Every structure is written in structure tokens, then in C-alpha cells.
Image (spheres, helix red, strand yellow):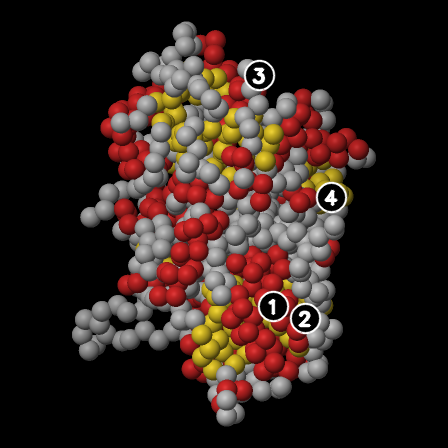
Amino acid sequence: MAEKPIQGEKRVFMTGNEVVAWAALAAKAEIMYGYPITPQNEIMHYWTRMAPKYEKRFLQTEDELSAGFTTIGGVLAGRKAFTATAGPGNVLMQEPQAMAEMMRIPIVTIIQQRGGPSTATVIYSQQEVTLTTYGGNGEGLRIVFSPANHQDLFDYTIKAFNTAWKYRFPTFVLGDGYQAKLRESLTIYDPEERGIQLIEPETTLGKLRVSSDTEPRHIRNTYNTEEELLEVLTQYFEDYEKCAREIVEHDQFDCDDAEIVVVSHGVVSRAGKGAVQELRKQGYKVGYFRPITLRPFPGEALRRVADKAKTLLFVESAQGQMAKLAKEAIFGSTVAVETLFKPGVGVTSEEIVTKVKGMK
Amino acid sequence: MTMIPQMPKSWRLESKPHKFCPGCGHGLVLKALGEAIDELGIQDKLVYGCDIGCSLLSWDFFNVDSVQTHHGRTTPVMTGVKRANPDAICLAYMGDGGGYAIGSQHLVNAAARNERITAILVNNCNYAMTGGQMAPTSLPGMKTETTPYGRDIKEHGYPTQGPEMVAAITREGAYIARGTVANIKQLKGFIKKALENQMAGNGFSFVEALATCPTNWRTNAKDTWAFVENEMPKFFKVGEIKNPAAKEGE
Amino acid sequence: MFGGVPVDDRIVEAYIGEYASGKSEVAVNRAIHLKMTGRKVTIVDLDLVEPFYTLRPIKKKLIEMGIDAVAWETKETMGLGEAGSVIKPEMRWVLRRTGDVILDIGYGVEGAKVLNLIEGADTEENLRIYVVLNVGRPMTASVNDIVEYARGLGHVDGVINNSHLGDDTTVAFVEEGAKVVTEAARQLKLPVIATYMDKKFKPAMSGEVDKMGNPLCFLERHMVNTFW
């Protein structure tokens, strides 16, 4: 039997893409399906290098449609399977993701956002929020984590597998090109040694029929009447609402007496944190709010913050994709809204400080 | 004395020197194509499409209306142009991924429908632009970034023989050939016939060109040529596979 | 003297290593050090997978110091990594220049084979290929891992201990790395050229060698980890 990839804990120095590969190993993922697209290629490069040693499998598919559907196949066969993509690949990935939503198939996908739309840049953005949270031709029955640093990337990739397999919604880790290539230190660990129970996968298709009494599994994603579909979806919405309470996550500080609250996610929240800390030192009453799950969105928590603040400042490397989710979540609030949108471009804490100082 | 570079007339001066790596096969294929366009006199009628990957660097290569598409979608875009404007000479230019992986279903269907377009596919056995991952045409045992221990036939099958696949699907009217940058004159001949096949309204025309990629093969000049001249033809036979003109009593 | 290797003629060094081993930082520091001793130096960015993530941000700074930096400018290129150029033609002929040449070679399964793309690399007598090792990188963390890794790289002339954890580096970590790297080097029958450390640790170090007796070199951090 293959040795465990990580024994105990270790402090290491890695790039984001590698972190994902190691986290998948730590989560006992068994097979990766993928197609080359920058900036997530190194996830495949590292997975294929480590695969033989840890008896893992890999398939480079002919495109992202196939990568998504083969991942579905792997999951239905009872394996912890995952895939990764970016940009235009993410657009193609919506086809299989919609099927996973409809059929409650727990596939895990890592997205490393790049400039968009179309080919745009291969570098960085936060412009795939809408696509990842609500893509496909459905109601966005998905779970999306937005990590901000490599420790998050490791922790939440492991969590993504558990979350997907426990609640049975396609789950995403929404990174970006900067996080993919940045080098940082983090602690990698064996989750089970830390008391994190790893959910065991179940086989849907191909389970050995023990006797002729065992019924075969027939699964589909089509329905005959509108009423049938509504019934199924209504149940799904209930399930989603219930698990949303357990899954939703956010981080905040200094919001209680804040006049302006900086709302940011992912790697931009690092700039947000730095800016808020700096502004507080200079006597400004600012707060920090970071959604960690973009779906389900931490609406209740943000509403409580919005009720006390004068202005919410939305900062993202997109033209308001996160802001849109937030505004919908706090509909009815009379808080003022300001924005710092830089689609496809990084945001520094200095820029946020300057913006806040220029406000009101 | 001023040296006048021997560039095809259809080449665009302003985008030269081109951006391909030194030693890249694309430069040679595009030269053969440029000369073919000149000799056929179709520069004003040509519509040129290129894919994602290194072929993208040819987006402003010619003095011809050009479009850079999404990965694998050059064939359908050119199909769309031709269906809307049959007078245009439509050329889809792509790499091994754009034709045999993500674009294969479009290639196969265009061939099946006998679309009157010309597709040129540059085969250098890897996904060069994204850093050298395995391609459908990577050779057995070849080390790539996603086959770090070498392409295993049991795992990944044999290299795709695209022209043979396309030839199996097409019926009368299709022109199919495989050339190589190791024999530019022959390659140009194939490209010309492929374009003439479109001009005659016969059907789908497809030319694969074996090409060099020293950057990702990590080979010096000598080994680069050895690979394309000796290794690649072991899996990819150079020559004409289907030629409607030949059938007519040639 | 540098790492005990006598410096005759000119210096031609290729730095290879795992992804994020710190080879670019080592290469840049080496180039600057040579320049400061009055030598003519060229540094070449041969990272073919990510041609712009390393030297590009500091190219201007290096040129101002009088170092010839052969690297792409973003403006010169079209996109990156799937819509952009890879090798700059000048890079192929870089050994025809006079003076020292420092080659920063990116990662990739083929290790030092990138040197096949440089004209004259096979006949350059002064060429030394050094593997930069960071035990903080999981695939080169143990003696066995390093030995296996180095054996797959092709011909190598020496190893460099650049063990670090970015901002979390400690002297103890570097020294621990020195132990591992030195033992691996012994098994590979290769010299340890030096142990590199962030210069902020200089006051904590007494003497010119690490605990294993390898020469110490201090790094100025030029590679900034921020947006470009």
C-alpha cells in the first residue's frame, strides 16, 4: 500500500497550485481529470509527478467539457475525483457542472481566475465569481469557497471534498492566478491526525450486485412535467437552505463602531485587511468584512454590519461581481455603497487607504 | 545595396520579425502558406482564422482578414464564415490540441459535412504555449509536463493520426495530406492543392504539417531536425492521402 | 574564490532547480555580486514556462546597475502562457557575448536540457550547472528526495543550499537544510557550492561558513512577491 503523502505536520514553502495538489492528496482524492489552461497547469504537473508514488490516477482529457464529465464519471464510480480550470475553461465547465447540480453529484473543482471575458489575460482577476456561483442553466445550487492565502487554499481544498461529499452539491475552491503562482509558507498536515474526519466516497454506479434482489441504480437529469421538476427543485432548495447554515463562513473585525466597512474576498481581502489596520492606526473608523463562502453568501452577517455602518466599500478585481451578490443578500438595507472595481487588475492596500480617505 | 527580404507578398511586413521561437516550425509552415497564397493569387479573397496556443501568434501575420478564436473553435468559425459567404476562401489554422483534442469534434463534423474550408494543422507533439503538456500527438515514451515519466501507450493510447482519421470520414471531394517542414517544397504543394480543392468547390481539405518545437523538446538544432525527420515519421506518414484531382485520370 | 572553485577565464553558470526553489533570487544576487567586483555580466531569463514572472520586474534595475539583462518586456509580448511568445531569439546566442553569463533556468520535467537551446552550451568549457535546493519544498525535503531529483536532471556540477520558508525563514531552518543538502551532495559526489541566506541573518552568523563548513553567501531580496 502506498505511503501517506503527509505524515504529521510540516512547515513548507510552496506555490498555490502545488498547495492544491498536496491538499487533494491530503484529502485522499484518488483521481484528477484536467485539461491544460494557464494559470492552473501546475496542479496537473505536480499531481502527475506525485501520482505514481501515492497510487493516484490522472487523465488529461480532450477539453474542459470532457474534464468535467469524466470527473462526474469518477465520482459516480465511487472515487474522490476532482478537476481544475480557469477562464474560458470555466465557461466550458458549466455544462458538466449543471449536470452535477441537477443530479447532486459531489464533484470538486478548483478555479484559478484569470482576466476575462474570453481569452483576455492568463494572469489574474476575480471575474469568475458570477460564473462559479451561478453558472450553468440553473439556480446556482453550488458551494463556493474563496481562499485568501495558501493556508486557506490547503484547508479549504480539503474542506471542499468533505463539503461536497456530505451535502452533495458541486463544490468549488475559487482561487486566482496570483494565488496560483505566489510563493508562501504554510503548514501542510494530515487532516485525520488533526481530528478532521474525511468523508468516505460512495459508489453510485458499478456497485457489485450482491444478489438478484438488489435493484440497479437508474439516475437521470431529465423530468417529464413542470410539476415534477418543481418538486425536485423545491426539495433541493430546502436541502440547500439547511446546509447553508452549516457551511456559510465569513471573517470580520472592527465593524462594531465602523462608519465605513471594506468588503472584499479572496486575495484582495489581504489588501483590505492591511488597509483597515492602517486606517485604524490613523484614527479612521473603518471595519473589515470578508465573505469566505461566496455561495452561500454570508448575507445575514453582512446585513448586521450594514445596519450599523454608514457606507459599505466593495473592493474587487472585477466590475462588481461580488458586490452584486452582497447587494442581493442585504436587499432593503439603507446603507450607502461605494466601489473600488479593478477588473483583472490587482488591488493594493495603499489604493484602498487612498480611496477611503477620499470618501465622504 | 539594399537587401529585399524574400517574403511572400501576402505576409504583413509590419508584424515582422514574427514572434515565434527561433527554430519553430510555424514560421516555415506559414512561409509555405504565404507562397501558396501568392501563387494562387487569392490574397484578397482569403479569410484566415487561428486558434489558441502558438498558432495565435499568427493572428496579424498576413495581409488578410484574420480572426483569432477560442481554443478548438477555429474550424467552426471558418465554417460559419464560409456558409455565410461562399466566395471567401476560408482557412482554419491550428495546432495539435486545437484540431485533435478540444477541436476534434469540430474537425470531425466539418469533415463529415464536407465543409468547403481548408484546415491546416501544425503538429509538434506537445502543447507548446502552455508549457509543454502532452498532446494527442505526443510520441510514446515522450516526457511532457503531464507525462513526467513518459507517455505510456497503455494509459494514453497511441499518437493521434489525424489525417487518416479525417480521411476515413470523408467521401468524394475531400483533399487530405500530411507534409513536413523538413520538405517545404512538398508541403507547399500540398497546401496549394488543398486551397485549390476549396476553390473548385469540391469539399473539405486538410493538411497536417509535421513541425519542430526545439523550445519544448529542449533540443539543439541537430537533434531538433533528427526528431522531425526521423522520429516523427515513424508515427506520422508523410504524403497525400486523398486527392480528388488525382482520381480524374491523373 | 566562490565556493572553492577557482575562477579562471570567464564565469558561465546555469542555475536550475525545483519550482520556487529560489534559483532566480540566487542567480540575480550572483550576477550583482560579480558586477560589483568590476566584471562584465549578462543575466538571462530562461524560464520558458513562465517567462515573465522572474526577471521582468527588475530588468530595468539590473540594466541601471550595468548588468545586461536578457529578458522579455511585457510590452514586447502578446499575452502570457498560452497566447504569448516563449524564447527570445537573443537568448539562443547569449554565450557569444563576452564577459560572465548567468543563466536563470526555469522549472520543467527536463531539467537542464534547456541548455540544448543555447548555442555553444555543449562546448562552453566554463559552463557550470548548479542545482538550487530548498528543503522547504516538499519534493526536495529529504536526502533521498534530493538524490532522486538531482539524478534526473542530467549533468550537474554542484548544489546550492537555499533552504528557506519565505518570510518565515529562520537560521535554524537554513542550517537544517545545510545538513540535508550536504549529505545528499555527498551521496551524489557533488560539491556544495554555498549556502545562501537572507542578509538580514548576517549579524546572527559568526564566520564565513555554515555549520557543515559550506561557504556562506548573503542574499539581497530583489524578487518582489507582489503584482506586476
In the structure shown, which secondary structural element does the residue marked by tag 4 occupy?
Answer: strand
Q: Is residue A69 visible in the rendered structure shown here?
A: yes
Q: x and y percent of residue B21 in the render? A: 55, 50
Q: What's the residue type where badge 2 is placed?
A: Asp
**x and y percentages locating residue B198 in the rendered image:** 61, 81
Residue matched to label 2 = B38
Mark seen at residue A339: 4
Mark pair 1, 2: CA separation: 9 Å
Q: Which mark is residue B33?
A: 1
| Disc 3: which residue | C38
The residue sitting at 60% across, 63% down in the picture is B30
Q: In this view, does B192 lie to the left or right of A26?
A: right
- A182 vs A28: above or below: above
Q: Residue A28: percent from the left, percent from the top?
A: 32, 49
Query: Residue A198, percent across and down?
Result: 33, 48
Mark 4 to mark 1 CA distance (whole Å): 51 Å
Q: Give, as a three-letter code, the residue at label 4.
A: Thr
Q: Do labels 3 and 4 share a chain?
A: no
Subunit bearing disc 4: A
Give the CA separation, mark 2 to mark 3.
Answer: 55 Å
Disc with the residue nearer the chain's start (1 vs 2): 1
Q: Are marks 2 and 3 on the same chain?
A: no
Query: With C122 as the anchor, is A298 left or right in this view?
Result: right
Helix, strand or loop at mark 1: helix
Q: Element type at marker 2?
A: helix
Q: Residue sitting at 18 percent across and 74 percent down?
A: A211
Of the pair C217 and A236, the residue shown nearer to us: C217
Name of the residue lying farthest toward the right: A360
Distance from disc 4 to disc 2, alpha carbons, whole Å, reads 54 Å
Residue at (46% x, 35% y) in the render: C20
Q: Could you tell me which chain the residue with mark 3 belongs to?
A: C
Query: Nearer the observer, disc 4 or disc 1?
Result: 1
